[in-house]
Image: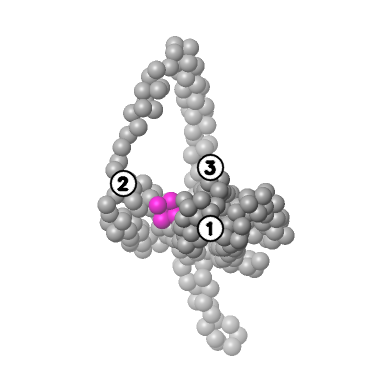
Amino acid sequence: MTLVEFTHDASLVPKYEVSVEFYRAVFSVVAALVVPVGLSWHKKPWYAVPFSTAYASFGLLPLPLGERAWLTLGAVVLTSVSATLLCRPWERFSINFGRIASFTALNTGKRIALAILLVAGAVYAYIGAGSTFRRVIELSDSNRIFIVISGCLIAVVGCGNIIAKIVKPLVDEIENNVASGVLASEITEFVSSAAHIGWIERVLLFGFLASGKPEAAALVIAAKSFTRSTAISQGGRLVADYYLVGTLASVASALLVSCATRLALGLPPI
């Protein structure tokens, strides 16, 4: 199947129909590039470039694109490398030897327990390796599943950096007010937890919206508003504005990506 199929109708008017392979290629490339941005991995090129390469390979190479798949993969790698170069100086790469030392400091009983777990894990891996590998291959060949996975990564992780930039002026103002004593120091904890709550929020929103359940997505927003109402009331208008802007940006990103995902799957946007 080619990327674009050309057909004629009764009136001989040309009609272009984009195949699902094309959408898989687009979603995989976008996810491979925006996920490291959302996680600020371009300041850590040993994370960003391997992830972009691996994810784009997993999304592109199974497609019947021939040399175009390899050319697109090369373009993704070059884009990721250039993004990391633009983010220099990079964070220093370091190994946490303290954690390694903590493992070596285990007593004899715990070492035996870990050894038994490793042996059991090896047995499980040996028994299920073949079927697990085949299942992974089957999933990688499913264009629709890969489009959904890529769309979820774009909505949840890739859009995080955009949302952070949108609310950054409000965050800076809140931090200044906390430093000057206008706002309580507990508000800082409210702001710092917002990013992780936003990830969970967008996972649920994308799942409900992509599956055609917008009424369930509304319950997610209602539940979040209920649980965060106390901190909002303590923080005043500035914190309320931060919460509103962040929530609307999070909902909008999940909505847009879920609509694009449904369209790519040949479904109505809502």
Disc 3 secondary structure class: helix
Any part of residue 181 in sight: yes
Tell me the tag on residue 155: 1
Type of the residue with mark 3 = Arg
Mark 3 vs mark 1: give the one in front: 1
Q: Which segment is the magenta one?
A: 36-40
Instruction: Determine which quarter of the picture holds residue 148.
Output: bottom right
Disc 2 secondary structure class: loop
Instruction: Determine which quarter of the picture holds residue 219.
Output: bottom right
Q: Nearer the viewer, residue 243 or 15?
A: 243
For the point 56% across and 45% down, the residue is 186
Q: Which residue is mark 3?
A: 135
Q: In the rendered view of the protein, which quadrant contains the C terminus? A: bottom right
For the point 47% across and 71% down, the residue is 4
Tell me the tag on residue 91: 2
Taking the view exactly as shown, the residue that stands out farthest to the top is 108
Total label count? Answer: 3
Type of the residue with mark 2 = Glu
For the point 48% across and 59% down, the residue is 173
Type of the residue with mark 1 = Ala
